[in-house]
């Protein structure tokens, strides 16, 4: 037999007060004077009876559903997704709201259907996230609902967005290798022309130039951003003329391939070769031996920042235009054991290994 919903009338009877008083207490109606002991009695009565507020009735009164949507291309199927969702969810929970997640798998029709469904459910706003940092075209349905972008930017004015600070990430990776004393360096970049590839290379080259490193002591090659791509690129770099003593990798997955190539060539990390990754994909960075020093992408913070901005827009007074801030979040260097001073003392042996 279906259990019937406890009504506000039953709570009033249990607490010995009027229905109006119960409504004022449970809905925290501002400006209503209710004695603290009465408030406590009402809340205790509601808890004993298992009273749950009628969310539909509340939404009709407040014009708010206390729900937001999170739409992403692969956001629910990647290692980083959980942190983005958790950051957004923690902010939502602090405001007694719920996050609905829609994963689109890069399918435009699925994305459009998912957004339409969220809007039919009257979400108060939408977080639009991408797996990798890029510029996107905002779906037309989002023009009429508060929206914030995560890990993406767009040309539509008035839309807040948050992305990683790619340039600073490249600078920090260079600083790690420079501080260890390396002067022959390489960067294995993404073969795709995306903001992360441009920004990380810009920051890496800028810092090396500022440190007085000569152009012919810096190599930049491109590869697929997976272990196989990293392996092939590392073989090319390490068997060529003037092989680098320090390699910065576009991602931790690329670094996996560098580790393999180094092992095959008889090079020890970090004694003979230092390696810096990017992402802090923990099951890779901590699973490699030695542990990989890497630049962390702040996925949790991006999710939390975006959710905070979204709720500010949702709660902005009617008729006002909320500000549309943007943010580039700099990730910390996660130091492990893959970086050491260059192997000047071992250079003859290193040459024999590569012969």
Image (spheres, rainbow, N blue to C red):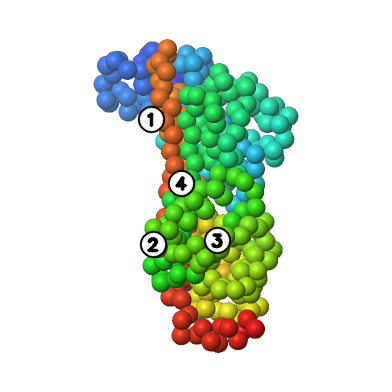
Point out residue 135 in the picture as x, y percentages from the top left corner: 57, 36
Q: Earlier in the sequence, mark 1 or mark 2?
A: 1
| Mark 3 / mark 4, whichever is N-terminal | 4
> Which numbered marker is on residue 165?
4
Q: CA distance from mark 2 to mark 4?
A: 21 Å
Earlier in the chain: of badge 3 and badge 1, it is 1
Residue at left 44%, top 71%? 182
Give the quarter of the image for residue 2.
Answer: top right
Marks 3 and 1, how far apart at CA: 63 Å
> Which residue is denoted by mark 3 in the rendering?
187
Q: Are marks 3 and 2 in contact (CB under 8 Å)?
A: no
Spatial CA distance of label 3 from label 4 is 18 Å
The residues bearing labels 4 and 1 have C-alpha atoms spaced at a distance of 49 Å
Place of residue 194 in the rendered image (x, y in percent of width and height, measured from the top left) = 59, 45
Q: Nearer the viewer, mark 3 or mark 4?
A: 3
Question: Disc 3, disc 4: CB below 8 Å?
Answer: no
Is residue 146 left or right of 107 when viewed as pictured? left
In the rendered image, is residue 15 in sight? no
The residue that appears at 44% across and 24% down in the rendered structure is: 313
Tell me: 226 left or right of 151. Answer: right
Q: Is residue 115 visible?
A: yes
Q: Which residue is mark 1?
A: 44
Q: Earlier in the sequence, mark 3 or mark 2?
A: 3
Quarter of the rendering containing residue 4: top right
Give the residue pinned by disc 2: 211
| Earlier sequence position, callout 2 versus callout 4 | 4
């Amino acid at each position: 037999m279906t259990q019937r919903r406890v009504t506000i009338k039953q709570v009033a009877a249990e607490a010995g007060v009027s229905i109006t008083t119960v409504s004022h207490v449970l809905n925290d109606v501002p400006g209503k004077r209710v004695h603290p002991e009465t408030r406590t009695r009402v809340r205790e009565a509601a808890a004993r009876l298992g009273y749950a507020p009628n969310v539909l009735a509340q939404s009709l009164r407040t014009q708010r559903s206390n729900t937001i949507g999170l739409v992403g291309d692969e956001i629910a199927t990647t290692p980083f997704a959980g942190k983005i969702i958790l950051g957004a969810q923690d902010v939502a929970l602090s405001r007694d709201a719920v996050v609905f997640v829609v994963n689109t798998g890069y399918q435009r029709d699925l994305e459009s259907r998912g957004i339409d469904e969220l809007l039919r459910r009257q979400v108060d706003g939408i977080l639009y996230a991408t797996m990798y940092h890029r510029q996107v075209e905002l779906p037309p349905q989002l023009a009429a609902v508060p929206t914030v972008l995560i890990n993406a930017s767009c040309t539509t004015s008035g839309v807040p967005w948050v992305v990683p600070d790619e340039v600073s990430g490249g600078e920090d990776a260079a600083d790690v290798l420079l501080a260890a004393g390396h002067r022959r360096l390489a960067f294995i970049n993404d073969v795709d022309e995306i903001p992360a590839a441009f920004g990380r290379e810009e920051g890496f080259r800028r810092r090396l130039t500022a440190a007085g490193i000569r152009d012919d002591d810096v190599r930049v090659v491109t590869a697929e951003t997976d272990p196989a791509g990293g392996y092939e690129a590392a073989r090319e770099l390490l068997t060529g003329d003037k092989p680098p003593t320090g390699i910065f990798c576009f991602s931790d997955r690329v670094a996996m391939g560098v580790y393999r190539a180094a092992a095959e060539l008889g090079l020890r990390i970090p004694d003979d070769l230092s390696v810096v990754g990017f992402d802090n994909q923990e099951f890779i960075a901590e699973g490699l031996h030695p542990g990989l020093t890497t630049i962390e992408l702040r996925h949790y913070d991006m999710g939390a920042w975006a959710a905070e901005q979204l709720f500010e827009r949702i709660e902005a007074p009617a008729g006002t235009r909320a500000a549309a801030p943007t943010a580039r979040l700099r990730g910390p260097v996660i130091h492990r054991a893959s970086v050491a001073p260059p192997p000047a003392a071992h250079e003859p042996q290193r040459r024999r290994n590569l012969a």
